[in-house]
Image: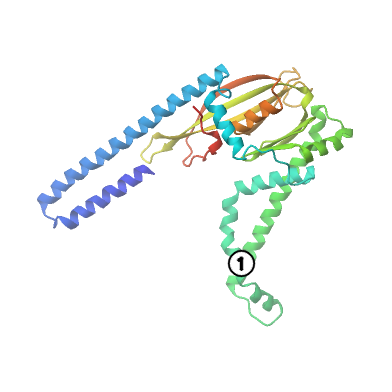
Amino acid sequence: MYFWLFISLFLFFYLLIFICSGFTNGMILLFFGIGDFVFILLTCIFDYFCHQKLERDEILANYVASKFFSGGYFISRAFVAAYNSYCEKGKGCIKRPRILSLRHGIILWRFRCLLRRNALVMAAVIPTVLILAINIWDIIEYYAGTELITTEHMFAVVLTTVEIIYVVVLYLMSLSVFCTWRRSISDNGILDNDMSAIEDSYKFGDLFICRESFLIVSPAYLHIFNGEHFCSLKREGIWKLTCLATRIKYYQKMSQGGSYYASNEYRFRIDFVSTVKSTKDDHMGSGITTYGVELNQYQIKMLIDKYFGELKREMIYREEGSTRIIPRIGIKENMIIR
């Protein structure tokens, strides 16, 4: 983005030169030299600030890594003060699921994720839907035999029908999440006669939401949805927590090749290590299974203090690189507290 901005300014500068100089050879050569100097100077300034930003972010990343490895990030004075401010603003209030039925809740969460990921496809058809809404009376008159339908009306009807079919297909795809969960509960040591208890734990549990994921905590069960899959497990089998902080470094691709450091983003995740025997995701027959969900750092702090303070904890920090042209915008609750 900055590269093309520089090119545009550079061309505009030369155009201004030709207009103001009267196209004399001496003035053209002079301003061409000045233009080259200004372009090189702007490029050097841009590289300098990118390098300075990378150095500052690396220093901050080293601080986060040291705090996580020592286990002191969530108990530092600065973080505790930020966490108390977060709770005082009401963001730390415990929520409840809006839809009481577990089946409809799972399907709706998955359906919402699919719609969000395919929002561009839906947005492309919205103008056509508006045309259909505006001209709906003409279409009714056409079917009543008192009006001729136009090509625009038919075009709106066809695309609206395609959109309706598309939404129905996404909803049918969402049904598979509940079916998969229903088949997998036996793998987590949950019997069929426990279904009423699972339903109650979902209705009256404490809800934590982050991006496309959510976690519901009840006295007996945990319900985890990571945007793709839904699982339920007994709290009595959880013996360890793993708190994971991931720094994603975004690099902007350049048209002439190569890339430069653009920004970074921190994401936090908590994994529940369970000893309940499972036939899936079993590590070499050890009977230990890990279930993880992405949350913000304040929600992880709240979970540890309120529900799992007595469990063993492990802190992990790692870094990843991404060359996506448009980085994902991180949530404010994941800003590093120092």
Identify whether 89 is placed above or below 168: above
Q: Amino acid at mark 1?
A: Ala
The quadrant where residue 214 appears:
top right
Residue 252 % position (x, y): 42, 38
State the residue at coordinates (77%, 29%).
233
Q: Is residue 7 left or right of residue 92?
A: left
Q: Residue furthest right?
A: 193
Q: Is residue 125 left or right of residue 207?
A: left
The quadrant where residue 18 appears:
bottom left
Q: How is the image coloured?
A: rainbow
Identify whether 164 is placed above or below 291: below
- Residue at the spot of label 1: 156
Identify whether 210 is placed above or below 13: above
Residue 244 % position (x, y): 59, 26
Identify whether 126 is placed above or below 96: below
**Label 1: element kind:** helix
